[in-house]
């Protein structure tokens, strides 16, 4: 559950999600669940001209299994905190 | 200010996966499938795999700046084929810059487009040696 917990700390921040079908969507993280399904608000596409049908979409739900990368806002990763959380998880909570 | 600690969640506080879809129930949605198809419909039900029940489904076929819609009725979509579900903003639908054409017309355009793509490919392989500079 480490990454689920980590993504929960990013709610409200702007992230970019790169999908396996080469779509790249930037938006404000609205929610995340344990499958890392992601809900984004106010989305923007990296290449809107190539995907004109997405222009009528403002908010979207992305299935976790189609995500390739998530680009995080700079400075959002506190390595110490993640270390901590990782050790705690490895000890079994 | 200290950043919040990343704590493991209390297992009872973790919502069931896919719960966020509750907010999309009974709304008109655009569903992007893994094979590139786009379905428009009203979400009536779903489960934790994002299996979906869509009512009044239409497939939207977009080629270049033209599109057509094909009525498909009630559909159940297996979750693994779902890429994303988008809320449709009615003021931006159909998307600006796209024009509606009949289904027969879009099929013709689709075919011509595919053919052009194929020709481009074969020309490129045949004349590759000329392209070197």
Image (cartoon, coloured by chain):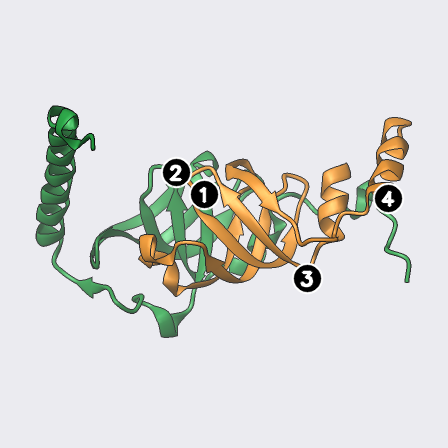
Chain colours: A orange, B green
Q: Disc 1 versus disc 2: distance between alpha carbons?
A: 6 Å
Viewer-proximal residue among A86 and B61: A86
Instruction: Classify 10 Å Cα crowding around label 4: few (below 14), some (14-19), many (20 and above).
Output: some
Give yes or no for contact between labels 1 and 2 (Cβ–Cβ under 8 Å). yes
Residue at point 56% right, 51% down? A16
The residue identified by callout 1 is: B83
Give yes or no for contact between labels 4 and 1 (Cβ–Cβ under 8 Å). no
Give yes or no for contact between labels 3 and 2 (Cβ–Cβ under 8 Å). no
| Image quadrant where one finds the N terminus of chain B | bottom right
Q: Disc 3 versus disc 1: distance between alpha carbons?
A: 22 Å
Residue A52 on image: x %, y %: 32, 58
Chain of the residue that carries numbered disc 3 in the rendered image: A
The residue identified by callout 3 is: A12
Chain of the residue that carries numbered disc 2 in the rendered image: B
Can you tell which mark lies on residue B34?
Answer: 2
Same subunit, labels 2 and 4: the answer reads no
Residue B98 on image: x %, y %: 24, 64
| Image quadrant where one finds the C terminus of chain B | top left
**Which callout, 4 or 1, points to the residue nearer the camera?**
4
Element under disc 1: strand
The residue identified by callout 4 is: A81
């Amino acid at each position: 559950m480490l990454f689920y917990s980590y993504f929960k700390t990013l709610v409200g921040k702007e992230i970019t999600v790169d999908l396996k079908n080469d779509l790249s969507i930037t938006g404000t993280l609205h929610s995340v669940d344990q499958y890392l399904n992601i809900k984004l608000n106010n989305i923007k596409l990296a290449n809107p001209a190539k995907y004109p049908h997405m222009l009528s979409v403002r908010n979207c739900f992305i299935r976790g299994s189609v995500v390739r990368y998530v680009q995080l806002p700079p400075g959002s990763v506190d390595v110490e905190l993640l270390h901590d959380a990782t050790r705690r998880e490895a000890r079994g909570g | 200010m200290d950043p919040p600690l990343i704590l493991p969640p209390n297992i009872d506080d973790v919502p069931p996966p896919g719960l966020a879809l509750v907010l999309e129930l009974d709304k008109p949605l655009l569903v992007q499938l893994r094979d590139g198809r786009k379905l428009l419909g009203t979400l009536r039900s779903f489960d934790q795999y994002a299996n979906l029940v869509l009512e009044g489904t239409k497939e939207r076929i977009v080629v270049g700046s033209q599109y057509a819609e094909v009525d498909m009725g009630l559909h159940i979509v297996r979750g693994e084929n779902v890429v994303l579900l988008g809320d449709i903003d009615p003021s931006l639908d159909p998307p600006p810059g796209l024009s509606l054409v009949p289904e027969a017309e879009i099929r013709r355009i689709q075919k011509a487009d595919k053919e052009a793509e194929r020709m481009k490919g074969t020309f490129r392989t045949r004349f590759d040696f000329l392209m070197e500079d």
